[in-house]
Every structure is written in C-alpha cells, then in structure tokens.
Amino acid sequence: MLRRVVQNFTTRLATALLSFGVVWLTARYLGAAGRGAVSLFVTDCAAILLFIGLLGGSSLIYLAPRRNLWHLLLPAYGWATLVCVLGTGMVALLRQPEPSYLLHLGILSLLQAFFSINTALLLGRRREAIYNLLTLAQVALLAGTLLLAFKLGGRWVSVETYYYAAYLAFGLPLLLSLMPLLRLPDPRRRHGRRLRATTRELARHSRGAHFSNVLAFANYRLGYYFVAYFADARAVGVLSVGVALMEAIWLIPRSAALVQYVDLVNTPGGSPLPESALRVGRLAVLGTAAAVLVLVAVPPAVLTAVFGREFGPAQTVMQLLAPGSVMMAVQMLISSYFAGRAQYRINNAAAVAGLALTLAGGLLLIPRLGIEGAALASTLSYTASTAFLLWHFRRTTGLGITSFLPGRTDITRAWQLLRSR
C-alpha cells in the first residue's frame, strides 16, 4: 500500500507544482485583481461541479468494481449536462456577469464534469496509472498554455486567456480518457432494466456520499464570496494565493486517503482497518505538519518577490491557516474510512458542524478582519469537523488521535521501502 501511495504522491506532487505554476502565472501577470477574477471563475466552476456528484462523484469509484461501466456512464453524463445548464443559469441570476463569462462557465464546467466522470470510473477499476497520467496531463496543459500565451504579451495577458487555455487543458485529456474506457471488457449493450436499476443505485449512493462534499466545498470556498462581498476582487486574489499554497500541502494526505478509499471499496465491509493503512496515515500527518512548518517560515519578502508586491499579506493568511491544515490531514484520512464503509452520515454531520463555524466566521470575522478573518474562520471550521470525526472514529474502531501520531518504527519501515524501489 505504501508503494502505491508513494506513486500517487509523486504524481500529485508534480500536479501540485504545476498548479502552483498556474497560481504564479495568473498572479504575476494579471495582478491581484486578475488573480481574484480567475479564482472566482474557478470557484463558480467548482460549485457547479459539486452538484454533478449527486449522481456520480466518488460513488462512481465505489460502484465501478461492481457494475457495468456503461450503465454508470450514461446517467452520469446526462445528469452532468443538466446540472451545468442549470448551474450556469443560477450564476447568471445571482451574480449577473457578462454573457461571455457565462458561455465559458457553461462549456468548461461540462468538459470538467465529463473528464472527472471518466477518470473516476478508471480509478474505480484500479487503473491508477492512467488516472494519474491524465490528471497530470490536464494541469500540465493548462500551465504550459498559460506560460506560452503570457510570454507572448500584449492582448494575451488577460483573464480571457485563462479560459482558452482551460479549453485545451480539459478537452484533450477528456478525449484521451475515452480510449482506456473503450478497452475495458464491459459490454456496451444498454439493457433498459439493468440501466434503470444501476441509475437508481448510483443516485442512492451519491446522495449520501456526496452531500458531505457539497458542505466541504462551502467550508473551503465560501470565504471567497464573503471577501468579494465585504472587500473586493483584489482581496480575493491575495487570499487565494495563501489558500492555494497551504492546500497544495494536502496532496500528502489526499494521496494516502485516495489509496485507502480504493482499497476499502474493494474489500468486504466487515474487515478492520489494516495496520498498513494506519502506518501510512501517520506518515501522511507527519509529512503535512513538516510541510506546513516550512511554508509558514517563508518571509513575506519571498512572496512579494515571487508573486508581486501586492501579495505580501498572504503570509499572514498562511500562518492562520496552518493549524487547520494539519487538522485537515487527519480529517481526510478518517472521512475516507467512513466513505469506504458507506457510512456517509458521519461525514455529513461533521461537514455540517464545520459549515456552521464557516458561516459564523464569515459574518462575524471577515467584516472586521478581512482576509485574516477568512483564514481564521477556516481553521476553526476544520478543527471542529475533525474533532467530530475523531470522536466517531474512536467509537467505531476503538482508535483515537494517537493512532495518527507516527513513531520511529513507522519512519524506519517507510525509509526501507523507499530505498528498495
């Protein structure tokens, strides 16, 4: 398991570095206001994509080993199309952006939706290498296209360039993802009754599994909208840089949680959590804490030198997010355990607890403290939801927070495995 986590982590590390390149390019060339506009567009896309998971999402991974892939793909595609149309309409009503913005939003959200559906099915069938390659290709295309366009200068240095780069970055990997799906042995006959039964099963699992993801997104990104309302796009840009840098560290626990989830959905429900999973979890938390300490030690002068003179305050944002970022490492590991056992209500309840603090913090802290209030509200939210999950994890497994504190044996074993590669 640790070998697969290392492979997954390596891919995610490369993806995170390329994503950092996207953040740097948009901040450096477009400034805080331009970076804020890109962040709000990405957040709008992500908000639409959340509701796609109500008939798909992680449930596709859960059902892929058990059902015909084409019986999962067809309803997921249909639902994604409907959600993208309705979601774009909701953004038009709530935010009233330019028509060109809405056109880009609708098309790009649909491309991302189809891509995520295809890759989820491949991951559910344990095609992890293909999944990692496609994910890496997507962000590499985005970063590379932006770099080329911004280097050309002139009219290419604009927010609109991001949209056109995203078309290539999601369109080409989407086409490539169809090839391994077509090579799978699943018969492509429709079978009306089986298709309807699988659709109902997918909807039943998705509602429980994905509701916590909707709430988690609100915990992660609701602060952007609060800051945009109480401040401006420039403040959103500064906040987004600090958040992006801290969330990049989450690739460590996400790599471990993803492998753990895939293993759990492919094993009997009554099986206990293996010691190997606990060992990987402890190392993931240790790696997260070490990376957080390194990042918060970066002086503001380095941030202004890298991103521009407007982004110095992002250092304070990172310092306030640091405790919550470590807590999130624990939360991701525990939530993947409950999701792998289809115990979705626990994850949902934890997300509700976190959302309550996000809303309270957004209304009370952001008007007074600005982006610092947004960071503080996030840390309080992450801490509360993680504490809730830890309590239920102890009740279910008998294991507490000490199960995620690494010891010398864990580190020695990991080093031996890494040297044997």
Image (cartoon, rainbow, N blue to C red):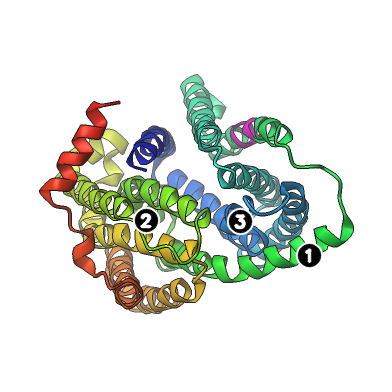
Mark 2 or mark 1: name the one nearer the start of the chain: 1
Q: Residue at x 22, y 39 (%)?
A: 414
Q: Residue at x 41, y 38 (%)?
A: 8
227 left or right of 310? right
Does the magenta-highlighted stretch encompass residue 168? yes
Mark 2 neighbour class, 10 Å CA radius: few under 14, some 14 to 19, many 20 or more: many
Q: What is the secondary structure assignment of the residue under circle 2?
A: helix
Q: Which residue is mark 3?
A: 49
Mark 1 or mark 3: name the one nearer the start of the chain: 3
Number of numbered labels in the structure image: 3
Q: Amino acid at mark 1?
A: Ala
The image shows residue 275, relative to residue 197, as above or below, that is above
| Real-space CA distance between mark 2 and mark 3, rounded to the nearest whole angstrom | 25 Å
**Residue 31, x across and y down, in percent:** 40, 41
| Real-space CA distance between mark 2 and mark 1, rounded to the nearest whole angstrom | 48 Å
Of labels 1 and 3, the one closer to you: 1
Q: Residue 235 got which mark?
A: 2
Q: Quadrant of residue 200?
A: bottom right
